[in-house]
C-alpha cells in the first residue's frame, strides 16, 4: 500500500484546541515533510524533519519523527479557524527527489 | 517571486480533444514535477524533470500523456486524446535539487480539468 498514510482522515475541533495528526510510512526515509492544502489551492510546505531528527518546531507547529515505528505526528497548538485545511505528510526516500504523499487529514477548526 | 504559475486554471473539454497544461517554475529551480490529484487516488507523481531532462516518467498513465520541458522556465503536459477518467486537478511543482537531494517543493495553484 501507499507510503505516508495519515490518520485520522478527518478531524473537527474548536478554535483554541490542539490538533494532532499522524502519519505512517513503510520504507526508510531521508526526510519527512508536512504540507497544507486549502480548498481549491495548491499545497504549501509547512515543515521538514530529517531522519536523524526526533522533534522540530515552527511557530505553532510541532513535528515528531519516530523512525523505529516509521511514524510522524504533526501538532498544531491553539488552532484557529484559518487552520482549516487538508494536511499531507510526504516521505522522501532513497531516490532523494521523489515525495510520496498520503491521502491527507481534513482538519476543520470551528470558530 | 511570483511562485509557480500554471495555466489554464480551469479547463472543460470534450472526450477526444487534446488538452495542454502549462507551467512556469520558480526562477532558479532546477527540478520540476507534474502531479495529478483525485479523490480516489490522492496525489500521484506523473513525471519529474531535472535540469530540463525527464528523469522519471513511470507515473505517466499511458501513451496519451506526454510532457516536455524545452527550457528551464517552461513545461507542458499534454493529453491526447483526453478521456473522462482524466478529470482531475493537475499540479506543477518546482524545487532546487542540491547534493543533499530535493527538499521543499513549491506547488502551483493547479489546473482543474473536466473531460466530458
Image: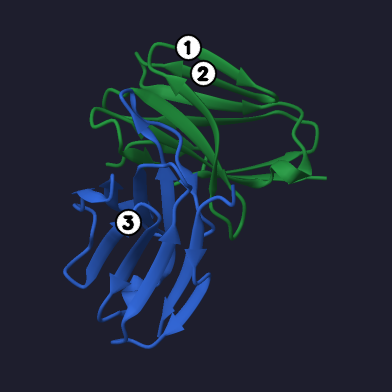
Chain the render paints green: A
Q: Which mark is residue B71?
A: 3
At horizontal 46% and vertical 82% (from top left) the residue drawn is B12
Residue B55 position (above or below residue A17) = below
Q: Nearer the viewer, mark 3 or mark 2?
A: 3
Residue A12 position (above or below residue B42) = above
- Residue A83: image quadrant is top right
Q: How far apart are labels 2 and 1 at the CA level?
A: 6 Å
Asked if the residue at tag 1 contacts the one at tag 2, i.e. Cβ–Cβ closer than 8 Å, the answer is yes
In the picture, measured across the screen, residue B89 lies left or right of residue A14, that is left
Image x and y of residue A44, in percent: 56, 43
**Residue at mark 2:** A64
Q: Colour of chain B?
A: blue
In the picture, measured across the screen, residue B20 lies left or right of residue B6, that is left
Tag count: 3
Q: How far apart are labels 3 and 2 at the CA level?
A: 39 Å
Residue B81 position (above or below residue A46) = below
Q: Residues within 10 Å of mark 3 (few under 14, many from 20)?
A: few
Residue A21 position (above or below residue A83) = above
Visible residue check, residue A87? yes
Visible residue check, residue B39? no
Tell me the chain of label 1. Answer: A
Asked if the residue at tag 1 contacts the one at tag 3, i.e. Cβ–Cβ closer than 8 Å, the answer is no
Say if labels 2 and 1 share a chain: yes
Tell me the chain of label 2. Answer: A
**Residue at mark 1:** A54
Amino acid at each position: 500500500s501507499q507510503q505516508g498514510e495519515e490518520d485520522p482522515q478527518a478531524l473537527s475541533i474548536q478554535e483554541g484546541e490542539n490538533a494532532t495528526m499522524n502519519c505512517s510510512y513503510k520504507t526508510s526515509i531521508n526526510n519527512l515533510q508536512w504540507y497544507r492544502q486549502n480548498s481549491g489551492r495548491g499545497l504549501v510546505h509547512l515543515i521538514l524533519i530529517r531522519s536523524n531528527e526526533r522533534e522540530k518546531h515552527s511557530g505553532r507547529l510541532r513535528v515528531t519523527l519516530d523512525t523505529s515505528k516509521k511514524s510522524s505526528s504533526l501538532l498544531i497548538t491553539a488552532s484557529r479557524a484559518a487552520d482549516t485545511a487538508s494536511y499531507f505528510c510526504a516521505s522522501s526516500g532513497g531516490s532523494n527527489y521523489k515525495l510520496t504523499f498520503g491521502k491527507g487529514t481534513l482538519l476543520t477548526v470551528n470558530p | 517571486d511570483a511562485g509557480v504559475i500554471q495555466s489554464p486554471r480551469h479547463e472543460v473539454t470534450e472526450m477526444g480533444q487534446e488538452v495542454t497544461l502549462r507551467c512556469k517554475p520558480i526562477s532558479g529551480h532546477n527540478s520540476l514535477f507534474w502531479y495529478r490529484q483525485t479523490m480516489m487516488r490522492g496525489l500521484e507523481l506523473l513525471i519529474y524533470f531535472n535540469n530540463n531532462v525527464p528523469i522519471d516518467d513511470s507515473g505517466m498513465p499511458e501513451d496519451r500523456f506526454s510532457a516536455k520541458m524545452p527550457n528551464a522556465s517552461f513545461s507542458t503536459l499534454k493529453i491526447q486524446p483526453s478521456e473522462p477518467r482524466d478529470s482531475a486537478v493537475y499540479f506543477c511543482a518546482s524545487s532546487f535539487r542540491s547534493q543533499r537531494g530535493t527538499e521543499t517543493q513549491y506547488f502551483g495553484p493547479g489546473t482543474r480539468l473536466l473531460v466530458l
